[in-house]
């Protein structure tokens, strides 16, 4: 408790973190969607996970755990996996007879989102978002599990009145 | 690959690697490992492999350093001997 | 003779520095007592191997040859015959970086668990404690 008072809240760090986190997440999304340039799902997911690490650094691990609980982590991990595998399965179903996994051009959505090249890129973006969600949740979960201490729970009870 | 930049970056790389395994303070060693990863990312971008450099800057210099600091918050900070 | 040395040894300094870094990491993995220092050595070792592969893919140094550009599709570049670096080792090394991060996370979890069990992460002290336990029973 005394250590928390000594290295407690800092106004500068909190304000800067509050300013930076949305932009970091936006940049992570930009990296994730970049099917035509450098980057991809893994890198974008890691950048977004870094924003959560910054949040924990500025506001403390108990508050970070409260705002981003483990159940959300599990939900994000499974949702990303289902996005990836589901689109792969959709491509298998629509590419009749040849069964090509992740052959985006086979999905017949041409009336909705344009011709084959654009379509493949847009579906690839969805796959990248699935990868990014899984990686983001996995890294945040790893970070919390490594940094979590047992005495953090008592600190939370002490600081809950603020 | 531009030879003078490459040579300078590689020189710093060896220097930082030796420093990272020499210091007794493990927090300093982790910070030096982050610097090492960042210089390595610079080397790769300068060698025209932008994708690898970008990944290394995000993962090696960012996520790995954060994970190691998180682990260090639970173990002893100073190396003995 | 000097020409041979320059062409085959000095011009390939990237590989020499990759080997130097690899040996620095290897030394840390073998000789350092602290387990976290061993992990830092492991990281340096892996990165040195990535440097070796990326050096393999690079074409054209500043000494006379044409520069290779980044392997990004560029409409005019295809027709004008631009030289670009080989992207295959890059893709392999992307996978390598991902595996390195995962390995490090597992190893850190093991180190934290060892510290909770023994109260230290110095290899010698852990071995001594194990020996004491064996002698005691």
Image (spheres, helix red, strand yellow):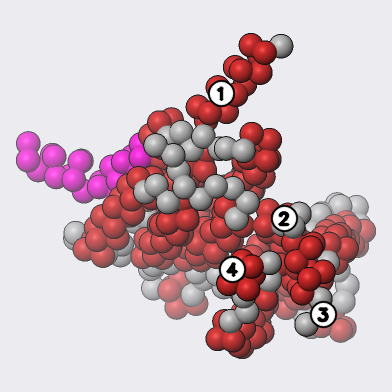
User: Residue B38 bears which disc, if any?
Assistant: none
On the image, numbered disc 4 is attached to which residue?
A39
Q: Residues within 10 Å of mark 2 (few under 14, many from 20)?
A: few
Do discs 1 and 3 share a chain?
Answer: no
Chain on which label 1 sits: C
Residue bearing the label numbered 1: C127
- C70 left or right of A5 in image: left
User: Which residue is painted at 51% across and 50% down in the image?
Assistant: B77
User: To which quarter of the image does residue A82 belong?
Assistant: bottom right
Q: CB under 8 Å between callouts 4 and 3? A: no
**Structural distance between the alpha carbons of marks 4 and 2:** 34 Å
- Which-is-in-front pick, marks 1 and 3? 3
Magenta residues?
A: C1-24
Q: Which mark is residue A161?
A: 3
The lab-note entry on whether marks 4 and 3 share a chain reads yes
The residue labelled by disc 2 is A149
Q: Secondary structure at mark 3?
A: loop
Q: Tell me the CA gap for discs 1 and 4.
A: 44 Å
């Amino acid at each position: 408790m005394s250590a928390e008072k000594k290295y407690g809240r800092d106004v500068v760090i909190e304000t800067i973190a509050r300013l930076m986190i949305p932009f970091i997440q936006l940049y992570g999304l930009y990296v994730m969607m970049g099917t035509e340039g450098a980057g991809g799902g893994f890198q974008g997911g890691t950048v977004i996970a870094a924003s959560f690490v910054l949040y924990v650094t500025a506001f403390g691990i108990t508050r970070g755990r409260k705002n981003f609980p483990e159940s959300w982590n599990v939900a994000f991990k499974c949702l990303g996996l289902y996005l990836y595998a589901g689109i792969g399965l959709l491509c298998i179903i629509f590419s009749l007879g040849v069964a090509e996994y992740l052959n985006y051009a086979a999905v017949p959505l041409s009336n909705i989102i344009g011709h084959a090249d654009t379509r493949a890129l847009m579906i690839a973006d969805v796959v990248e978002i699935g990868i990014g969600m899984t990686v983001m949740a996995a890294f945040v979960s790893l970070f919390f599990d490594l940094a979590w201490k047992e005495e953090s729970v008592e600190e939370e009870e002490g600081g809950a009145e603020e | 690959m531009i030879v003078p930049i490459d040579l300078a970056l590689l020189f710093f790389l060896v220097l930082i690697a030796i420093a990272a395994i020499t210091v007794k303070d493990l927090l300093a060693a982790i910070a030096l490992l982050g610097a090492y990863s960042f210089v390595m990312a610079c080397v790769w971008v300068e060698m025209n492999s932008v994708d690898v450099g970008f990944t290394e800057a995000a993962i090696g210099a960012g996520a790995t350093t954060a994970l190691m600091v998180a682990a260090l918050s639970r173990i002893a900070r100073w190396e003995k001997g | 003779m000097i020409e041979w040395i320059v062409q085959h040894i000095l011009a390939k300094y990237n590989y020499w520095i990759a080997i130097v870094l690899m040996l620095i990491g290897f030394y840390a993995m073998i000789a350092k007592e602290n387990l976290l220092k061993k992990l830092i050595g492991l990281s340096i070792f892996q990165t040195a191997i990535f440097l070796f592969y990326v050096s393999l893919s690079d074409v054209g140094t500043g000494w006379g040859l044409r520069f290779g550009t980044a392997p990004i599709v560029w409409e005019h570049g295809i027709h004008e015959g631009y030289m670009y670096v080989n992207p295959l080792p890059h893709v392999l090394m992307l996978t390598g970086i991902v595996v390195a991060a995962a390995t490090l996370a597992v190893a850190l979890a093991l180190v934290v668990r060892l510290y909770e069990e023994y109260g230290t992460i110095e290899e010698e002290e852990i071995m001594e404690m194990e020996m004491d336990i064996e002698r005691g029973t």
